[in-house]
Amino acid sequence: QVHVVESGGGSVQAGGSLRLSCAASGLTDTEYCMGWFRQAPGKEREAVAQIWRGPDSPYYADSVKGRIITSQSQDNAKKMFILFMNNLRPDDTAMYYCAAARNCNGRRLAGDFDYWGQGTQVAVSS
């Protein structure tokens, strides 16, 4: 069973930075995808960044391109996916979720991810 846990987030002023961490345990597949998504009140969930093993990875949404950096690593048996966000804006305020998909080797829609964390709140004030 895959288990996803996010950490980080918090409240910052516009222009600030945050680091979000995602740890996925039980993700033993050679090909897998991990993604960061966000959902603001009254809005649909949108993809922020995704990684997979293969060409064209990583994917960054246009709304955050140039303001985020991602990194991935392995910590014992956990796959780590880190999201660094810089120059944050009030419209970045949302609940941020990490998700994982098995047997995955390309960009996927949110509905294709089977395993989700509980989310971590990011609030950016002007």
Image (tube, rainbow, N blue to C red):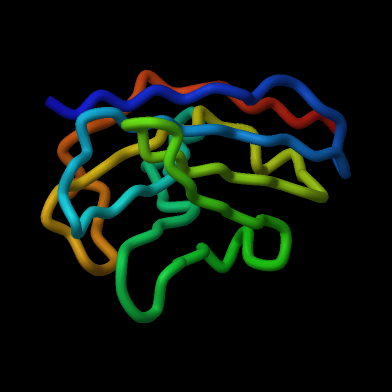
Q: Residue at x 24, y 56 (%)?
A: 109
Please determine whether, in this image, residue 106 is positioned above or below residue 98.
below
Please determine whether, in this image, residue 53 is positioned above or below residue 1.
below
| Residue 76 x %, y % | 39, 31
| Residue 19 x %, y % | 67, 36
Q: In the image shown, does 111 or 55 lie closer to the viewer?
A: 55
Within the image, what quadrant is residue 113 found in? top left
Q: Residue furthest toward the front?
A: 76
Q: Relative to residue 19, is residue 118 drawn left or right?
A: left
Q: Residue at x 32, y 27 (%)?
A: 4
Please determine whether, in this image, residue 75 is positioned above or below residue 70.
above
Q: Relative to residue 105, is residue 7 drawn left or right?
A: right
Please determine whether, in this image, residue 81 is positioned above or below residue 11.
below
| Residue 12 x %, y % | 81, 27
| Residue 122 x %, y % | 63, 27
Q: Residue at x 46, y 25 (%)?
A: 6
